[in-house]
Image (cartoon, rainbow, N blue to C red):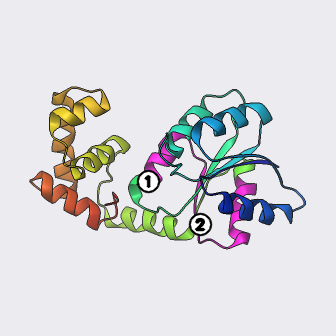
Amino acid sequence: MRLFLVDDHPVVRAGLAALVDGESDMEVVGEAADAAAALRGIRGCAPDVVLMDLQLGSGPDGFAVAEEVAKLPDAPRVLVLTTYESDADVRRAVAAGATGYLLKACPPEELFAAIRAAARGESSLSPKVAARVMDQARSGRPALTARESEIVALLAEGLGNRQIAQRLFVTEATVKTHLVHIFAKLGVDSRTAAVAAAVQQGLIRR
């Protein structure tokens, strides 16, 4: 399996490369610290699996990279390896095309198993993330869509409807419609309460 590593921390990339070096069926064929370098490298060396963090410094993030990778001919599988475990991040990653989602605190054996699963085209979730997904499913609480999660995150930044519409390239009417759905799903009646509920439920980061 040919792996490409994407993380803005050199020490993390070096540590992952050292781990993978001990596996006879895996080989690191490239690495990058930012989105632009990642896309150039992935196009150039055609890996089987891209192991990627979500936060890549000040430029485009891992979600954007995953979306671009998914458009490539014979696109490699994207396996997210991050410290972020919010429901919103998981949903955005999957919507962007990620095959799996792991936390950096996972043991090496779990990482290797997920890489092999991704290479086979199978999905894999960190047990902690999977437990959150199952808890939400059992609760019967309607899940926010990726776009609704984006809007709540922008509410948390203090943006108004017009600013949100401009940021997302949609109309203010569309934003208002999304807010109606968000309020209903979260059981709230104000923007402040929506942000508080989303943070409490782990749907967005603050």
- Specify the farthest residue to the left: 189
Task: Quadrant for residue 72, please give it.
Answer: top right
Name the residue at 23% across, 36% down: 164
Residue occupied by mark 1: 89
Residue 83 place in picture, x, y as percent: 51, 64
138 to the left or right of 195: right
58 to the left or right of 126: left
- Specify the farthest residue to the right: 24
Q: Which mark is residue 32?
A: none
Name the residue at 48% across, 69% down: 131
Most foreground residue, 57 or 158: 57
Residue occupied by mark 2: 104
187 to the left or right of 89: left
Asked if the stretch drawn in magenta spans residue 113, the answer is: yes
Name the residue at 67% across, 63% down: 11
- Quarter of the image containing the C terminus? bottom left
Marks 1 and 2, how far apart in space?
A: 14 Å
What amino acid does circle 2 point to?
A: Lys
**Label 2 crowd (10 A; few <14 / some 14-19 / many >=20):** some
Question: Answer yes or no: do the residues labelled 1 and 2 have beta carbons within 8 Å?
Answer: no
Q: Which residues are magenta?
A: 90-117
Name the residue at 46% across, 63% down: 85
172 to the left or right of 151: left
Residue 101 place in picture, x, y as percent: 57, 57
**Label 1 crowd (10 A; few <14 / some 14-19 / many >=20):** many
